[in-house]
Amino acid sequence: MTESSVATAAQTPIDSAENEVVEPAVTSAAGSFDTPPAQPVTPVATRIFNPGDRLDLLSNVEMDVTAELGRTRMTVRELLSLTPGNVVELDRAAGSPVDLFVNGTLIARGEVVVVDEEFGVRVSEIISADGTSSDQARA
């Protein structure tokens, strides 16, 4: 026997009764690799982030939405001294657009409106992720 035939014989199991090479069986927990599984396996990320379902995943998520008329700074003493009828001066002029925040992030600006005796905000511009605004009133 040559060196190469010795190495081949040591690596491949041989059935001594018939001197045939015995192929090792390859199986998995699901069964033999020779038969395909009943359903193709789809990676979890593909199933979760299907482009058509992205917004559906978020449709029931609750978020804090805040409409901000303006801001001011005052001391605790000034805050505790407020009584009904006091006027608190804000950093914006009357009629200025209000800022609309979602979870603390500015997403839009608009104007205060009254609908069925309740206040609301009519959105006039959307603020994009890069901080620029797109005027929705012109569209």
Image: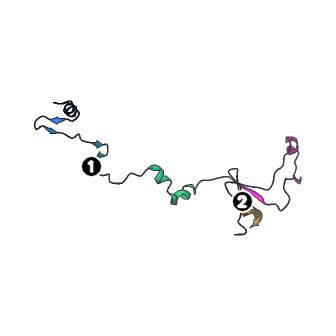
Residue type at numbered disc 2: Ser
CA–CA distance in space, label 2 to label 1: 58 Å
Is residue 110 a member of the stretch shown in magenta?
Answer: no
Name of the residue lying farthest toward the left: 17
Residue 65 is tagged as: none
Q: Position of residue 52 (x, y in %)?
A: 51, 60
Residue nearest the viewer, comparing 21 with 24: 21
Q: Quadrant of the N terminus?
A: top left
- Per the image, is 78 magenta? yes
Of residues 86 and 4, the one drawn nearer to the viewer in this rendering? 4
Residue 114 occupies quadrant? bottom right
Could you tell me which residue is drawn at 84 percent across and 56 percent down? 92
Dots 2 and 1: beta carbons under 8 Å?
no
Residue 97 at x, y percent in the picture = 79, 60
Q: Which mark is residue 34?
A: 1
72 shown above or below 111: above
Observer able to see residue 117: no
Identify the residue shown where x is 62% and y is 53%: 62
Which sits earlier in the primary sequence, circle 2 or circle 1? 1
- Range of residues picked out in magenta: 76-102
Q: Residue at x 31, y 43 (%)?
A: 29
Report the magenta stretch's main SS. Answer: loop
Few, some or many residues within 10 Å of mark 2 (<14, 14–19, 20+): some
Q: Secondary structure at mark 1?
A: loop
- Judge whether 110 appears above or below 79 on screen: below
Crowding at mark 1 (Cα within 10 Å: few <14, some 14-19, many 20+) = few
The C terminus lies in quadrant? bottom right
Q: Callout 1, which amino acid?
A: Asp
Mark carried by residue 133: 2
Q: Residue at x 84, y 49 (%)?
A: 72
Give the secondary structure at mark 2. Answer: strand
